[in-house]
C-alpha cells in the first residue's frame, strides 16, 4: 500500500494539470499505520528494512516538494505513518471521531521523523514532546485547538468539506502558490533529511 501511495503521489507531482491534491482513506481509517508483520519483517531482514525506509523517505520527500496545495480529509484514525502524512498537508480537515497518534514509542521505536519535524512547529515544542513521548491519541477537537488541524466536521463529511476548500485554491494563480510552497518547504526538506538519517527506528 505504501508503494502504491508513492506511485500515485509521484504521478500527481508529475502532472502539469494538477491544481490540488486531497488525501483521504477508504473505510473507517485515514491510515492505521504499519502492521506488526511489517515491523517483524523490518527487524529480521535488513534488505526489507531498507526498502520500507526508502519508500517512506520518497513519499514524504515527494509531498514536501509538491507544488500544489495538499489537503488531508481525515476520516478516522491517522496513526504512525498516517500522522506523518497529515502533518505534511497544507490544510487538515478532521471528522468527529477521527484522531492522530504516533505510537512508535510503544513499540520501542523512535517517533516518526515527519511528526518530530512538524508537530513542534504546528503545536508547540512542549506539547509535541508530550505527544511523541507518550504516543497518546489526539482527537479532532484537541487537534484543532493545538494547531494540528484546520477544521473539524461531522463524521462522513470530510471529503465534501475538503472539496469545498479546494475550490479556493482553484481560483488562485498556480504560480504564486507553487512559489510559496517551494519557499515554505526548502528548510523543512533540509531538516527532514537530517532527521531521517538520525532516526534509527522504522516508520
Image (tube, grey):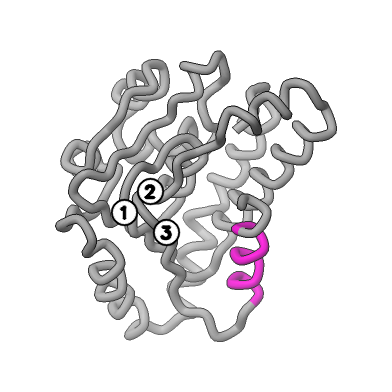
User: Split into 4 quadrants, where in the image is the C terminus?
Assistant: top right
* Residue 113: image tag: none
Mark 3 is surrounded, within 10 Å at the Cα level, by few (under 14), some (14 to 19) or many (20 or more) other residues, namely few
In terms of depth relative to the viewer, which is nearer, 195 or 21?
21
Residue 167 % position (x, y): 30, 80
Numbered range of the magenta stretch? 5-14
Residue 176 position, x and y percent, is 44, 76
Q: Is residue 25 magenta?
A: no
Asked whether 50 or 91 is in front, the reply is 50
The quadrant holding residue 124 is top left
Q: At 59% across and 49% down in the image, what residue appears?
A: 60
- Asked if disc 2 and disc 1 are in contact, CB closer than 8 Å, the reply is yes
Side of 184 relative to 15 (left or right): left
Viewer-nearest of discs 1 and 3? 3
Q: Residue at x 57, y 52 (%)?
A: 186
Residue situated furthest right in the rendering: 47
Residue found 70% across the figure and 30% down from its top: 197
Measured in 3D between alpha carbons, the distance from the residue under mark 3 to the one under mark 2, in whole angstroms, is 7 Å
Relative to the observer, which residue lies in front, 76 or 12?
Answer: 76
> Which residue is labeled 2 in the image?
29
| Residue 109 position in % (x across, y down) | 57, 19
**Callout 2: few (<14), some (14-19), or many (20+) C-alpha neighbours within 10 Å?**
some
Q: Position of residue 201 (x, y in %)?
A: 63, 23
- The majority secondary structure of the magenta stretch comes to helix
Q: Does residue 8 appear left or right of residue 95 in this picture?
A: right
Q: Which residue is mark 1?
A: 75
Amino acid at each position: 500500500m505504501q508503494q502504491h501511495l508513492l506511485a500515485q503521489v509521484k504521478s500527481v507531482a508529475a502532472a502539469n494539470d494538477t491544481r490540488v491534491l486531497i488525501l483521504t482513506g477508504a473505510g473507517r481509517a485515514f491510515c492505521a499505520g504499519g502492521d506488526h508483520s511489517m515491523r517483524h519483517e523490518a527487524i529480521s531482514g535488513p534488505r526489507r528494512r531498507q526498502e520500507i525506509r526508502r519508500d517512506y523517505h520518497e513519499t514524504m520527500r515527494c509531498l514536501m516538494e509538491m507544488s500544489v496545495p495538499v489537503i488531508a480529509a481525515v476520516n478516522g484514525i491517522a496513526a504512525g505513518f498516517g500522522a506523518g502524512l497529515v502533518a505534511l498537508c497544507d490544510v487538515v480537515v478532521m471528522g468527529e471521531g477521527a484522531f492522530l497518534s504516533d505510537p512508535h514509542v510503544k513499540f520501542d521505536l523512535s517517533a516518526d521523523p515527519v511528526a518530530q519535524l512538524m508537530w513542534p512547529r504546528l503545536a508547540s515544542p512542549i506539547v509535541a514532546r508530550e505527544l511523541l513521548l507518550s504516543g497518546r491519541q489526539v482527537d479532532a477537537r484537541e487537534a484543532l485547538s493545538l494547531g494540528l488541524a484546520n477544521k473539524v466536521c461531522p463524521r462522513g463529511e470530510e471529503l465534501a468539506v475538503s472539496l469545498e476548500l479546494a475550490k479556493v485554491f482553484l481560483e488562485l494563480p498556480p504560480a504564486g502558490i507553487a512559489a510559496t510552497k517551494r519557499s515554505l518547504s526548502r528548510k523543512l526538506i533540509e531538516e527532514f533529511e537530517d532527521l531521517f538519517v538520525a532516526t534509527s527506528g522504522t516508520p
